[in-house]
Image (cartoon, rainbow, N blue to C red):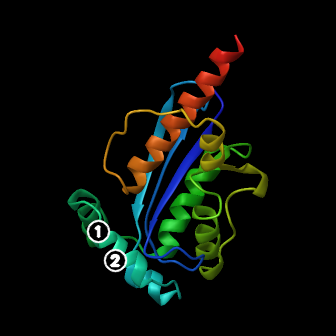
Amino acid sequence: MKKAISLDLETLGTGANAAIASIGACRFDPHSPAIDDLFHVHVSLENCQRHGLTFDASTLLWWLGQDEDARQSLISGQEQAAPLITALDLLSVFIADTGEDAELWVNGASFDLPILANAYRVAGMPEPWKFWAARDLRTLKNLHRGARITREGIHHNALHDALHQARLIQHIFTSLKESES
């Protein structure tokens, strides 16, 4: 089984210096329905702020406009949130345990990975992925505009979004394989 990681962040900003509220990820095989090893950690927003990560008003207003489940997922996670360095350390272990050749899928290579890379930089830690491992689901979706799957879980919950991304990637690759035969 080829291992890949689907990763999603929930943040309080859209720039590379955005505070990270939570990180969700799962290991999966893009070419089969296999999904395993879930990862979800809430990150202390106060600790992010102490590291110089920022909030922006437009993102805070956007969060206020989200449904109750999404807002509660964001807020309730802060009760047991990990310090930034702890969260990043846990993610580094998760990525390393997946294997050196693992692909790292995000829904927008210009969003999640730059924010995460900056968080590792301000924490004084190396990025745990190789630059060539980054994969962009937005590009894949654009190439396969008709690809749709039923959404499960809470929108804007980092783990639920990562799982949805993995399932969509699997669906697109399965569709591609079927169209080749």
Give the side of residue 37 with respect to residue 116, left or right.
Answer: left
Which amino acid, mark 1?
Gly
> Secondary structure under badge 1?
loop
Label disc, if present, on residue 65 of the rendered structure: 1
Residue 97 in the figure: left or right of residue 70 = right
Residue farthest left in this picture: 68
Mark 2 secondary-structure assignment: helix
124 or 165: nearer the viewer:
165
Q: Which residue is mark 2?
A: 61
81 or 7: nearer the viewer:
7
Residue farthest right in this picture: 132
Q: Is residue 21 left or right of residue 76?
A: right
- Can you tell which quarter of the image residue 125 is in? bottom right
Any mark on residue 181, and which? Answer: none
Q: Are marks 2 and 1 in contact (CB under 8 Å)?
A: yes
Residue 69: x %, y % from top left: 23, 57
Numbered label tally: 2
Residue at the spot x=53%, y=33% of the render?
147
Image quarter of the C terminus: top right
Give the amino acid at mark 2.
Leu
Q: Answer above or below: position of 79 versus 70.
A: below
Does residue 68 sit above or below 167 in this rendering?
A: below
Residue drawn at x 35%, y 52% as measured from the top left: 155
Around disc 1, counting alpha carbons within 10 Å, would you say few (fewer than 14), some (14 to 19), or many (20 or more)?
few
Question: Would you say 174 lies left or right of 180 here?
Answer: left
Q: Residue at x 68, y 43 (%)?
A: 102
- Residue 119 found in image quarter: bottom right
Q: Position of residue 2 (x, y in %)?
A: 66, 31
Q: Quadrant of residue 153?
A: top left
Percent x, y of residue 135: 68, 48
Cα–Cα span, label 2 and label 1: 6 Å
Quadrant showing the N terminus: top right
